[in-house]
Amino acid sequence: MSRCHWCDSSEVQFLCGAVIAPWILDDSGSEKLKQSGLSEYCQCQNCGLHFFSKRFTDGQLERMYSHYRDKEYQKNRQRYEPWYTEKFNSAIGNDPETIELRRKNLFFLVNKAVNEKKIRAPKVVVDWGGDKGQFIPDFPNLTKRLVYEVSNSVPIEGVARTDLIEEVKLARPDLVLLCHVLEHDHGARETIHQLSQLMIKESVLYIEVPEDRSPIVPRTKRNSALLSFLLRHRIAFIVFDAYSLFTIRVLGKKLPFQFLKQSEHVNFFCRESIVEVTQEYGFEVVAETRYSMNQNVRKSSSNALGLLLRKI
């Protein structure tokens, strides 16, 4: 890995070897990818981003996300993660408690910034990659709620859906939400560039990402024989994956035979990394938040970082 995908710096440090999640390999449509199945976990010394090095083609991403979290996806993933049950899968993004918490947090943050005269009260809100639009708060004086979504999700009542960027631009949004998107995005820098082109001066971008980078970096080497072995033996993969998750996430200890797997999240941001690139494209931070997303499913709960940025 020669450059950071986010800030384009060449100051990239290899941290450890990693494996691509087997359910992604099964669905990639690439024999070459299936045969290698290995990735690298890296850190940019310039902006602080942690990321997996393996990037997928547009075709592979389309295959991955065309049936993301549907019944077929859930069944295939559960073959490698027995805890990824149908109930667990359906709760992600649809848990009423989490939806309400995210909406309230954003409502408070935006209204506080409006009252402090840092931004204008939003009238047109676009949720970029926002599923059904269920996370758009009920801001006062809203005239339009639009979700830009390339999947076939059916929006909730009161929300319009488009998959046309030109339609987003014509809507002239006061507020664009980019929530829990960039961690999936293999072209995250280009997404910020694209938004900077379609947003008008003084409009506001809200970026929210999970703070879910690994607290422990395993000792796994490049082209690890262990990782190659695990990809060929499903039961062994399950055992070592559960061991790694427990010892890293729960115990917080660095132990032998741990490994990281690259699943849908490929980018792991901090405040500094977001500011580094958004400033390049003409945004300044006006407010920020950190909060715990208290989901019913323990494994998916995490802290979230949110930055409210004004286009200048």
Image: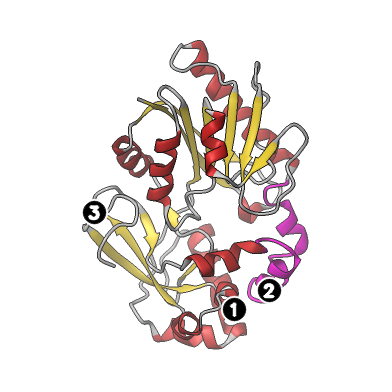
Q: Quadrant of residue 2?
A: bottom left
Relative horizontal placement of residue 3, taking residue 64 as reference (left or right): left
Q: Earlier in the sequence, mark 2 or mark 1?
A: 1
How far across and down, in percent of the image, does residue 308 sit? 46, 29
Which residue position holds label 3? Answer: 9
Labels 2 & 1 near each other (Cβ < 8 A):
yes
Please give the range of residues in magenta: 67-94
Residue beneath the point at 66% across and 21% down: 143
Q: Earlier in the sequence, mark 1 or mark 3?
A: 3
Callout 1: helix, strand or loop?
helix
Which residue position holds label 2? Answer: 76
Q: Amino acid type of disc 3?
A: Ser
Callout 3: helix, strand or loop?
loop
Question: Up-down: is 271 above or below 204?
Answer: below
Labels 1 & 3 near each other (Cβ < 8 A):
no
Q: Dot 3, crowdedness within 10 Å: few (<14), some or many (≥20)?
A: some
Q: Earlier in the sequence, mark 3 or mark 2?
A: 3
